[in-house]
Image (cartoon, helix red, strand yellow):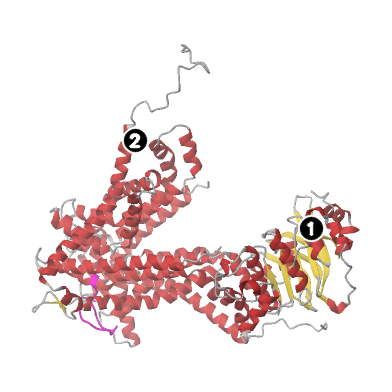
């Protein structure tokens, strides 16, 4: 993960340039679909926030949701692990199938869902406990207490944090820097052995160097997990994502703002030759 | 140069910015307000002086070690005995039973209000609990004596007419809102994103409440406990009415026992000649009570400082 | 990964049971207090109802339950309330103004003042009675009189009043202060013309709540000599009694009829308190400003 001296400064590369250099991901079969979303509509206390989303999320890909603020991408990603359940007045219509099972089916237990689909938040939120207890919290609570020490160590390794904290696991998690805290949250998430990791703007509260480490981490993690990431940083999407979904805001007649999915395709296609004009405007920066 | 008209720019030297005259009114106001503030200082000085002087005289006549360790309290009988231990034990016994009620139930209520109750329910539940705290203690004493004690007797507990258990349990109900309110405030201040992080890992509400929120709010919870203990120790009417004025050293909650506060009240009501040794017992016991509550207050502040959680 | 539907149902029965039991337990904790409150009120009303009449409100106590009333006691309580209003509120508000607007927080004596007020709030009420006994009754020879009782209750509620008034004053936005100062007003002008008027609803609410606490206090008054058998109306410098004291005296009698009388007295006391609290809440809702 070292930076080469002859590297062109990141700022001068447009998302288009970055995306051009990405290899097109191999075609996938139906069995590789982790989530199948069909006509999803999310409303908060009756007001529609996100409308008519249909797409598939592929296994072991990094899928990015991009778009201007207020377009519903955070709302959307929270549907995948039923976190919207915690918001009073939030309703979800349509279907999200997870490996063939409707996430919002009548018998489905949200706790079971979250055991398999983990989430990392925009602002790192470590518990006010030790580093060890933070990572061990999930396994303890889910009854995965065998070989706890090894689980913790492995999770910290996978989150590229072990080298920095391995010798001070008993220290408070709050003594870590912002970037370290976020990797701790990722380790915490990994410790419960999820299938999918959702990331809601995971690097937006971090400095550029910490951001780079998170992005590198995403590339490594996708070998073992399916990653879905929300980001407002287009270069980031161009760098890390295999598939990209662009959302935008639809302003209705009475001024109501609703989020809609505009286009969803491989990253290189989205940034170089998008089908929709709105996508073209956004990725080239012509968009407000 | 100086001119007559005060047009812009034409001035006779630097502007005069000092006050025209000394604002006497302002000074008077400040003095008056300062005097108001002094009232509270005077109160503390008065309390200490009121307690210390007769207490010192008392301890000239009664050996302080006998006082602190003696287990027979009989100042108004012959032969006189001034061992304060029965009173202290009585106080602690009632406090114990009060804590048995108010600590777990208060915490439980706080968790319910903070993590489980719907916003609409919380809106009227919390003020309703506050009503409990506003009922005068003489009413609770009445309730303990005339309703609760007979109830215990009917159930089969062989409690005396005056007994520690009745007073303690009812006092616990009185203190429940205090514990619940302060603990609930502490829990509500725990940032929401800590809960979100835990839920996202697959934790249930039970997990989040007990493993994340309560530990994070522990300093406030402990503060509420210490405050409850402090109030229980200083409470007079419930114990005077329901626990009785028999200063016997007993650990059986079914028996009567006099607390420090009940003794002070009972003696104060009675006709004790001013200046007598019996009169001075009021101040000796009062001083003991005051010191205990002061120490508890200091412990409370220390505990809160030590356990204050930092979230960021 | 095959396309066989996953089982996402909750299969952990013991966890579900634990969750339900916990929910039930904490719900019970919350409602047990309310249940006790209801039982208490019903019991008191039931016992006291036969004695709730004009005799109770106006007549003096008597050794015959049928003829006993709490007239002097009720009057005593009302007089105490009035005296508290005159004495406690100005001193409490004055202290609050001093601490919020005038005091330099970095000075040690002002910090001591704040710590002192906090400590006073934690002092048991009976210690205030001892203070009164030592200084007022015996010390300066005031005797066991109404004024002494009022002075002691004043000191008792002062910490609560100060805290409530400070909050009301603090709630006034700083922009109003800045605006007034910028116009050249002196400190007292800013306080008296801008801050106090804006803070009055909060101060009034806090005062009423503090007073309602004082009204229910019994222990300090016992020590300061509220007599338990006062058959005439109290005067400022004469023997006096108050409603909680009268209730206590009736409780102390062995006969059941007097216990029922005590219940009636409690109903009257609770009604007075309820009225005061309702007034305070009404005041707060009516005048609460949205800045």
Whether residue C122 sits left or right of residue A173 in the image: it is left
Q: Position of residue B88 (x, y in %)?
A: 25, 75
Q: Chain of mark 1?
A: A
Which residue in the structure is indicated by mark 2?
A: B26
Residue C272 appearing in the image:
no
Q: Chain of mark 2?
A: B
Observer-nearest of B3 and A208? A208
Disc 2 from disc 1: Cα separation: 63 Å
Whether the magenta-drawn stretch holds residue B258 is answered as yes
Image height of A188 relative to C272, above or below: below
Range of magenta residues = B244-261
> For the view shown, which residue lies furthest in the front direction?
A5
Which residue in the structure is indicated by mark 1?
A: A234
Q: Position of residue B301 (x, y in %)?
A: 38, 65
Q: Position of residue C42 (x, y in %)?
A: 38, 71
Residue B267 appearing in the image:
yes
Observer-nearest of A207 and C145? A207
């Amino acid at each position: 993960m070292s930076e080469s001296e002859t590297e062109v400064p990141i700022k001068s590369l447009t998302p288009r340039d970055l995306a051009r250099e990405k290899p097109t991901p191999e075609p996938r079969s139906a069995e590789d679909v982790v989530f199948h979303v069909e006509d999803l509509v999310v409303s908060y206390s009756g007001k529609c926030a996100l409308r008519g989303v249909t797409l598939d999320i592929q296994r072991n890909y990094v899928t990015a949701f991009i778009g201007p603020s207020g377009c519903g991408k955070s709302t959307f990603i929270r549907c995948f692990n039923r976190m919207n359940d915690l918001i009073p007045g939030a309703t979800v219509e349509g279907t999200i199938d997870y490996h063939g099972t409707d996430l919002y089916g009548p018998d489905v237990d949200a706790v079971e869902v979250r055991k398999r689909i983990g989430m990392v938040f925009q602002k790192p939120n470590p518990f006010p406990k030790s580093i060890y207890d933070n990572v061990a919290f999930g396994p303890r609570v889910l009854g995965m207490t065998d070989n706890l020490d090894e689980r913790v160590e492995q999770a910290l390794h996978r989150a590229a944090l072990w080298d920095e904290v391995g010798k001070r696991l008993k220290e408070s998690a709050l003594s870590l820097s912002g970037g370290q805290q976020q990797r701790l949250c990722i380790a915490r998430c990994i410790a419960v052995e999820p299938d999918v990791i959702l990331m809601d703007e995971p690097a937006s509260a971090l400095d550029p160097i910490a951001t780079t480490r998170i992005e590198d981490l995403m590339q490594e993690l996708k070998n073992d997990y399916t990653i879905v990431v929300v980001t407002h940083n287009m270069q980031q999407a161009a760098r890390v994502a295999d598939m990209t979904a662009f959302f935008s805001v639809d302003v209705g007649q009475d001024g109501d703002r609703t989020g809609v999915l505009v286009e969803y395709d491989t990253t290189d296609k989205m940034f170089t030759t998008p089908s929709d004009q709105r996508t073209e405007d956004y990725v080239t920066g012509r968009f407000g | 140069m100086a001119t007559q008209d005060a047009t812009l720019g034409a001035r006779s030297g630097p502007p005069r910015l000092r006050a025209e005259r000394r604002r006497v009114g302002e000074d008077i106001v400040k003095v008056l307000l300062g005097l108001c503030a002094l009232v509270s200082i005077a109160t503390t000085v008065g309390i200490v002086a009121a307690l210390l002087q007769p207490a010192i005289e008392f301890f000239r006549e009664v050996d302080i070690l006998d006082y602190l360790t003696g287990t027979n309290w009989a100042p108004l009988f012959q032969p006189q005995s001034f061992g304060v231990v029965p009173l202290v034990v009585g106080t602690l016994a009632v406090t114990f039973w009060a804590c048995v009620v108010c600590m777990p139930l208060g915490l439980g209520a706080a968790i319910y209000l903070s993590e489980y109750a719907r916003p609409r329910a919380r809106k009227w539940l919390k003020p309703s609990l506050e009503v409990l705290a506003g009922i005068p203690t003489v009413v609770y004493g009445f309730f303990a004596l005339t309703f609760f004690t007979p109830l215990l007797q009917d159930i089969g507990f062989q409690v005396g007419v005056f007994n520690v258990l009745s007073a303690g349990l009812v006092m616990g109900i009185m203190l429940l809102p205090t514990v619940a309110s302060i603990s609930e405030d502490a829990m509500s201040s725990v940032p929401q994103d800590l809960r979100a992080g835990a839920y996202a890992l697959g934790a249930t509400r039970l997990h989040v409440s007990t493993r994340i929120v309560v530990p994070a709010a522990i300093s406030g919870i402990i503060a509420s406990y210490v405050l409850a203990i402090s109030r229980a120790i200083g409470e007079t009417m419930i114990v005077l009415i329901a626990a009785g004025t028999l200063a016997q050293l007993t650990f059986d909650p079914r028996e009567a026992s006099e607390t420090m506060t009940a003794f002070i009240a009972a003696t104060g009501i009675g006709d004790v000649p001013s200046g007598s040794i019996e009169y001075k017992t009021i101040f000796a016991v009062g001083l003991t009570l005051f010191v205990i509550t002061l120490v508890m207050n200091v412990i409370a502040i220390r505990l809160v400082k030590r356990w204050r959680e930092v979230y960021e | 990964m095959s396309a066989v539907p996953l089982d996402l149902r909750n299969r952990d029965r013991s966890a579900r049971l634990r969750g339900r039991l916990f929910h039930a337990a904490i719900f019970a904790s919350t409602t047990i207090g309310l249940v006790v409150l209801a039982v208490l009120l019903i019991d008191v009303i039931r016992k006291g109802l036969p004695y709730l009449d004009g005799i109770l409100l106006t007549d003096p106590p008597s050794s015959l339950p049928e003829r006993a009333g709490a007239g002097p006691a009720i009057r005593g309580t009302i007089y105490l309330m009035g005296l508290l209003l005159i004495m406690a509120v100005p001193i409490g508000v004055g202290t609050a103004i001093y601490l919020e607007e005038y005091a330099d927080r970095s000075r040690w004596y002002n910090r001591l003042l704040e710590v002192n007020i906090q400590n006073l709030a934690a002092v048991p009420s009976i210690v205030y009675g001892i203070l009164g006994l030592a200084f007022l009754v015996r010390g300066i020879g005031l005797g066991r009189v109404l004024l002494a009782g009022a002075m002691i209750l004043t000191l008792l509620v002062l910490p609560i009043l100060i805290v409530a008034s400070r909050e009301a004053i603090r709630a006034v936005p700083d922009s109003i202060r800045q605006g007034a100062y910028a116009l050249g007003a002196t400190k007292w002008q800013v306080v008296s013309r801008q801050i106090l008027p804006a803070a009055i609803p909060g101060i009034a609410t806090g005062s009423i709540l503090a007073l309602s606490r004082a009204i229910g206090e019994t222990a300090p008054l016992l020590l300061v000599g509220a007599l338990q058998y006062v058959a005439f109306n109290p005067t400022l410098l004469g023997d006096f009694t108050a409603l909680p004291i009268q209730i206590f005296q009736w409780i102390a009698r062995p006969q059941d009829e007097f216990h029922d009388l005590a219940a009636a007295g409690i109903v009257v006391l609770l009604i007075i308190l309820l009225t005061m609290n309702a007034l305070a809440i009404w005041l707060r809702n009516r005048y609460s400003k949205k800045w």
